[in-house]
Image (tube, rainbow, N blue to C red):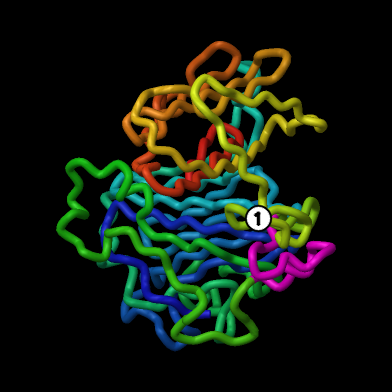
Amino acid sequence: MWVRPLPLCLPTTISLRILTRQTHSLILYSGPLGSHQRQSNNSPTPMLALQLWEGHPQLLVEGGLEPIKLGVNAVVNDGEWHTIHLRFNYKGVVLAVHPCGNGWLSASQDDDQCMASVSWTSPFNIKAWLASWPLQVGGLAHTTPSAAYHSWKEAPTPNPLDGCVSHLTLNEWELRGRTNSSSANCPAASLQLVDLGEPAYSKGSQKGCRPQESACPTNCGYKGWCEGGFNHPYCDCQPGWMGHGCSTPTTTYALGPHSSVSMALSFTLVPESLTMQVRIRTTDLNSRPLLLLSLPQEEVNFSIYVSDFLYNLTNCLSGRILSPFTYFYFMIKIKYNGDFMINLCGRSLHIQ
């Protein structure tokens, strides 16, 4: 499918989620639409391709002084959802995969296989390098351009993606951390969630992720959707609903002053991934504990407090605060119904 061209600004970040079991496939491509769009001089035609090679993410960049081939050792064709990040700036490019590695569990482990970077050999001019070609997702709508014709060291794989792509996002990191960036003068550098459901052109693709939806043993109904990849599929229910088909309303409990509820889980938590969902309704202005989760070994614990209608979260791991964040403030007022979800996966803590 075709979507809008990449923004001609730096820094630029591209993020997407992918689900596949394919070994070799093309994920993203921005370059000439065949062999006829060659530059007038003998320099390599600009091209960017993100592909899977032997199950590992690999980035190909042509058009500069030297071709760039960047890859990480993380395997993403294991039937699980993975997020791939690409970040371009004036110094170089970074390729990262999430979730990946268990470096957060022990200081003796690292996550070097999850990220790779390379520096430009000369100052990078993205406007001169990248033309206004559409960004192609999941394959090519034309024959694979010839590496020899375009003076490339290597052409991208011609294999289309057999799987799913979601959450294609541009410049998410820039929105989070921009302080004084030259890209502020470029409107295209703002956060963009690309609508894959209404592409400019598509062939052989369809909305949704049918492979994921068919992986759940039961129908998730109108109140849920299938998640968990191919290996551990489950129905992720909307707040207020539960059960294998998300058809059972959750039970509400009223808590009075100085009351509490303690529960012991009947299953073992997976150390790399933990998801919690809580729905609350209160008008209490005082600061008091809302939720505490801890393991018997006291290696991991979460404490959530309600303070001035804001959720305040502290998280510790083996007695250490997970840097760089100590406190998270949820800008969701709880005067009315409040729903939030916390997802811990590796070193990342996602709050929704």
Residue 248 coordinates in the image, percent (x, y) = 72, 57
Q: Is residue 103 above or below residue 108?
A: below
Q: Residue 201: say if magenta.
A: no
Left or right side of 243 for 291: left
x and y percentages locating residue 268 in the rendered image? 79, 30
Residue 182 placement (x, y as % from top left): 18, 51
Q: Name which residue type carries label 1.
A: Trp
Query: Which of 150/88 is in front?
Result: 88
Residue at the (36%, 68%) spot, across then down: 6
Could you say which quadrant of the image residue 229 lies in?
A: bottom right
Give me the residue at 51% from left, 36% from top: 349
Residue ID for mark 1: 241
Measuring from the top left, give residue 123's x and y in whole percent: 26, 50
Q: Residue furthest right?
A: 217
Q: Which residues are magenta?
A: 209-227
Between 288 and 236, the one nearer to me in the picture: 288
Inspect the magenta stretch and tell me whether residue 212 lies in it.
yes
Q: Is residue 120 left or right of residue 127?
A: right
Question: Residue at position x 52%, y 14% from top?
Answer: 320
User: 80 and 37: which one is in front?
Assistant: 80
Quarter-of-image position of residue 324: top left
Considering only vertical position in the picture, is 341 above or below 39? above
